[in-house]
Amino acid sequence: MIVVAAYIVVGVLYAIFTPLWQVPDEPAHYNYIRSLATGQGIPVLEPGDYDQALLSELTSRGFPAEMSIDPLEYEDHQPPLYYVLAVPVYRLFHGAVLPLRLFSIVLGAGILFAAYLAVQTVFPDRPELALRTVAFIAFIPQHVAMMAGINNDALGELIVALALWAAAAYVIRHVDRPWFIGILLGIALVSKTTAYPPLAAVFLVVVLRWRTERHATGWLLAQARWLLVPAFVISAPWFIRNGMTYGWGDPLGLVRHDTVVVGQPRSYDWLMLYGWRGMLSRLGQTTFHSFWGQFGWMGVILPSRIYQLLALISLGLLVGFVWWLFGPRRRSLSREQKVCLGAFLAAGILTVVAFVWYNLGFVQHQGRYLFPALVPLGLAVALSIDQWLSFLPRLVRPRVRSGTYGVLAILALFDIYCLFRFIVPALTK
């Protein structure tokens, strides 16, 4: 697929030219992998693993070679699967950073394939919708930057995309034994906590099928078993280990995390400092900027004219999607398609809710936390574009559609422009 090939080229450039450790939290993720690869086992999050003063000095000085990243271990509470999968890469290349970054790029390519299959399953006769969805996901500059770093984001997003594809197939093909979704749920539970909220939409799919197909309660309970039993078998050892390590009231290690990250900005402090208006303004602006592109450790900002253009494009896409959502085209969908889209929409909403919830405690105005919802967002963009194209005269539509790959080339070039015009110069001073 041309889009995937272009994404890999752009991603490899980001992986090569982004300076060492200049992807958010990359050193802490690297230290987790090293702990496993050197036989120290799954690390335990402990007091002192987060040093705000050291982190601020490292980021402000551009991670100078004479300063060690070894004390940065504040990601030790993360589920282990990504790090286990990265261990062979670490050992094969003796801990080199670039191969680990390229491993994330490969996972990112998997996200694109899974997104294409998910949308194609819902709209089998509309391949252009799948193509637009994949193009949107592939060329968001911030997403490329994150996929080109050492972190477990790519694996979490991949599992979410695969689960949405599986859920769509479950509905469209009227499957009655969704054990494969249960396996994906279990894998997600040991991959990334940000994957949990969007995957809750899978259970909505089961309920919607139960209601719309008028099954008995026994059918619903059987579906729940097919989902929960594999998920429990796969994830139970991890949660038991966490209970024994952090306490049975903290199976995710998040309570321990909150006590360890001393010095991380808290939302309550910002509320006292800026007030509601000031804090919400910063939340909205920073989240929007960092969704599209605010690089390094949130220190590399694009020119305001670029954000203004992106804001206009985003507004147009939002209007187009709302237009489609309440227009006649949606009413022509089949029952199965409506169930799938309802689940996709729920996945997006739950991701936003989780983002807001996180920001009630900590100042984490980072748009990358919305990336687990990129498949629903990408489909919304595709449907919006389709709606706007329907407004054009019929003779013009084929010409516009034929220019799709030209637009993709522009998006890929924009990513490269951001890398060499802003990221590399700013982070190599």
Image: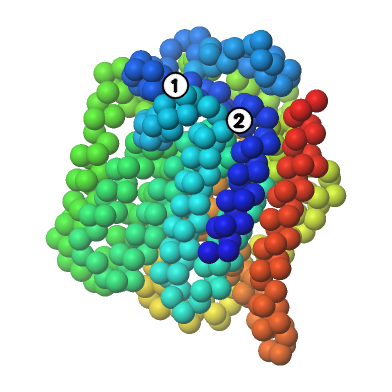
Residue at image location 19% in from the left, 45% down from the top = 229
Q: Is residue 350 above or below residue 215?
A: above
Residue at image location 66% in from the left, 77% down from the top = 401
Residue at image location 58% in from the left, 70% down from the top = 383
Estimate the x, y position of residue 284 in percent, counting from the top left. 69, 42
Please indicate whether residue 269 sits to the left or right of residue 213 in the image: right
Secondary element at tag 1? helix
Q: Which quadrant is home to the C terminus? A: top right
Secondary element at tag 2? loop
Residue of label 1 = 34
Estimate the x, y position of residue 121 in percent, counting from the top left. 41, 69
Residue at image location 55% in from the left, 58% down from the top = 4
Q: Is residue 258 above or below residue 297?
A: above
Residue of label 2 = 24
Instruction: Identify the mark nearer the N-term, 1 or 2.
Output: 2
Let me know if residue 146 appears in the view.
no
Estimate the x, y position of residue 118 in percent, counting from the top left. 43, 63
Q: Is residue 360 above or below residue 200?
A: above
Please indicate whether residue 216 sits to the left or right of residue 364 in the image: left
Amino acid beneath label 1:
Arg
Residue sticking out furthest to the bottom: 395
Q: Is 29 in front, or is 10? A: 10
Q: Residues within 10 Å of mark 1 (few under 14, many from 20)?
A: many
Asked where in the image residue 367 lies, by quadrant, the reply is top right
For marks 1 and 2, give the CA distance: 18 Å
